[in-house]
Image: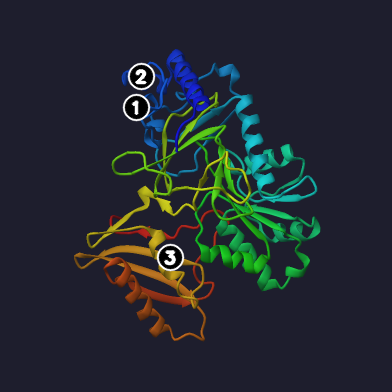
């Protein structure tokens, strides 16, 4: 994807401002000998930044404005290491709401809808982003926050919510609970918007079948506004990314070289107009591709990324083979007998690494035969044989937030 003249001017304005305020990132640009950006070649000479770089700026070293202009901070949802603090100006908050309202519009949400918001509030960007966009659109926000499934279902029925926003994990939990209670006829949901974790096709279809909703994926991360910088439309799973707010690149995770549209790699984002904490060429580690060609919705001014397949730093190495969780998920998706839930556990026993894959199925299936068939297919596709463990439906944990599916116990 080529950077256009307007985007180049916006990037140069960001670079000049960062150099002037001499914040954490301004110092990095100066050390790299960057004085401005006037061409595409100049842009690709700009250094990447990553999350560990941002941690070094804790607490407010990323700020590019006087403290009097900061109206809010957010922090990334990671649980390890020094937090990343992202300051927002009033314009940043307003711009984020505009982007989020656009997401709702692409999903066909209108001012007549009632939007039940289940992602978390607080330092995490999710809940407040969903709410701000909803209010900007003019729809009714029902700000539930996470958890308390009993109350979620009560409000879903009593308020006749038409749109549910959630992580895919919590949407699945709610869908299964609605089925278990037999209350689907009392639920008026029409649309589901999920974000903050990748979800495979099997999980997606399980939720759609249970709730009877249109399913939309939203994209974003705290470092770059938050969720709402892109969303899928009514013409497929691919997500439009708002090119008037961020510039999108796909790079080879190993070499850092830009990849042509259509090739899979790592998403890199540059904020074009963000004031509080502008980011230049931020490596997200999310794996996707820019989808070439026009979209059926006609909004080709905003490029599309494919469904996120995982993260470049999620790779597991076992028996000398590089494995991504998405590969295991794709294999399991070919077995209609198993549910959408799975768990991978890596351990080191008797001098060798072992992968155990836990899957769910019901009692009508020959568990021993299924176990062998899954193990054979993993060996055929990936190159080694895992230990496959079959459990009953509902045994694997469901989550009100994100579901942890990979546990590496080799170094504990």
Image-based side of 133 in relation to 268, left or right: right
Q: Residue furthest top?
A: 20
Residue 166 at what x, y percent from top left? 61, 53
**From mark 2 to mark 1, how far is it between C-alphas?**
8 Å
Q: Quadrant of the C terminus?
A: bottom left
Question: Which residue appears at 41% of the width and 17% of the height?
Answer: 36
Question: Which residue appears at 37% of the width and 52% of the height?
Answer: 314
For label 1, count other residues whose C-alpha is less than 10 Å away and answer few (under 14), some (14-19) or many (20+). few
Question: Which residue appears at 41% of the width and 59% of the height?
Answer: 326
Read off the residue under disc 1: 45
Read off the residue under disc 3: 330
- Mark 1 or 3 closer to N-term? 1
- Mark 2 or 1 closer to N-term? 2
Read off the residue under disc 2: 34
For label 3, count other residues whose C-alpha is less than 10 Å away and answer few (under 14), some (14-19) or many (20+). some
Image-based side of 304 in relation to 354, left or right: right
Count of numbered badges drawn on the protein: 3
In the image, is residue 60 above or below residue 188?
above
Q: Are marks 1 and 3 in contact (CB under 8 Å)?
A: no
Q: Are marks 2 and 1 in contact (CB under 8 Å)?
A: yes
Image-based side of 406 in relation to 71, left or right: left
- Mark 3 or 2 closer to N-term? 2
- Regarding residue 173, the answer to whether it shows in the image is yes
Q: Residue furthest front?
A: 293
SS category of the residue bearing label 1: loop
Nearest to the observer: residue 407 or residue 388: 388
Residue 256, by quadrant, is top left
**From mark 1 to mark 3, how far is it between C-alphas?**
37 Å
Q: Nearer the viewer, mark 1 or mark 3?
A: 1
Residue 365 numbered mark, or none: none
Residue 23, by quadrant, is top left
């Amino acid at each position: 994807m080529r950077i256009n003249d307007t985007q180049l001017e916006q990037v140069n304005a960001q670079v000049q401002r960062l150099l002037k305020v001499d914040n954490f990132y301004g110092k990095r640009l100066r050390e790299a000998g960057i004085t401005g950006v006037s061409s595409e070649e100049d842009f690709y000479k700009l250094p990447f930044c990553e999350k560990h770089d941002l941690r070094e700026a804790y607490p407010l070293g990323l700020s590019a404005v006087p403290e009097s202009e900061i109206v809010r901070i957010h922090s990334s949802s990671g649980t390890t290491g020094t937090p990343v603090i992202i300051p927002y100006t009033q314009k940043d908050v307003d711009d984020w709401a505009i982007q989020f309202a656009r997401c709702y519009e692409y999903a066909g949400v209108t001012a007549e809808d009632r939007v039940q918001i289940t992602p978390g509030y607080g330092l995490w960007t999710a809940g407040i982003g969903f709410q701000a966009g909803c209010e900007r659109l003019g729809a009714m926000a029902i700000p539930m926050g996470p958890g308390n499934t009993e109350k979620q279902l009560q409000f879903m029925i009593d308020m006749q919510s038409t749109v549910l926003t959630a992580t895919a994990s919590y949407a699945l939990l709610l869908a299964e609970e609605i089925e278990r209670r037999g209350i689907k006829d009392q639920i008026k949901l029409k649309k589901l918007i999920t974000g903050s974790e990748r979800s495979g096709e099997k999980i997606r279809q399980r939720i759609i079948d249970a709730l009877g909703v249109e399913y939309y994926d939203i994209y974003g991360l705290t470092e770059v506004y938050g969720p709402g910088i892109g969303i899928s439309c009514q013409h497929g799973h691919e997500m439009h990314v708002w090119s008037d707010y961020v510039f999108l690149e796909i790079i080879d995770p190993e070499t850092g070289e830009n990849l042509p549209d259509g090739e899979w790699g790592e998403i890199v984002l540059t904020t074009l107009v963000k004031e509080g904490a502008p980011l230049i060429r931020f490596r997200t580690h999310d794996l996707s591709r820019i989808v070439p060609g026009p979209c059926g919705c006609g909004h080709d001014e905003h490029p599309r990324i494919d469904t996120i397949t995982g993260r470049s730093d999620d790779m597991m190495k076992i028996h000398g083979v590089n494995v991504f969780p998405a590969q295991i998920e794709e294999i399991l998706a070919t077995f209609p007998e198993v549910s959408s839930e799975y768990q991978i556990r890596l351990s080191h026993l008797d001098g060798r690494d072992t992968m155990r894959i836990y899957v769910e199925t019901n009692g009508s299936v020959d568990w021993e035969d299924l176990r062998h068939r899954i193990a054979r297919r993993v060996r055929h596709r990936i190159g080694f044989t895992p230990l496959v463990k079959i459990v009953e439906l509902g045994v694997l944990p469901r989550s009100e937030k994100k579901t942890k599916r990979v546990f590496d116990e080799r170094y504990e």
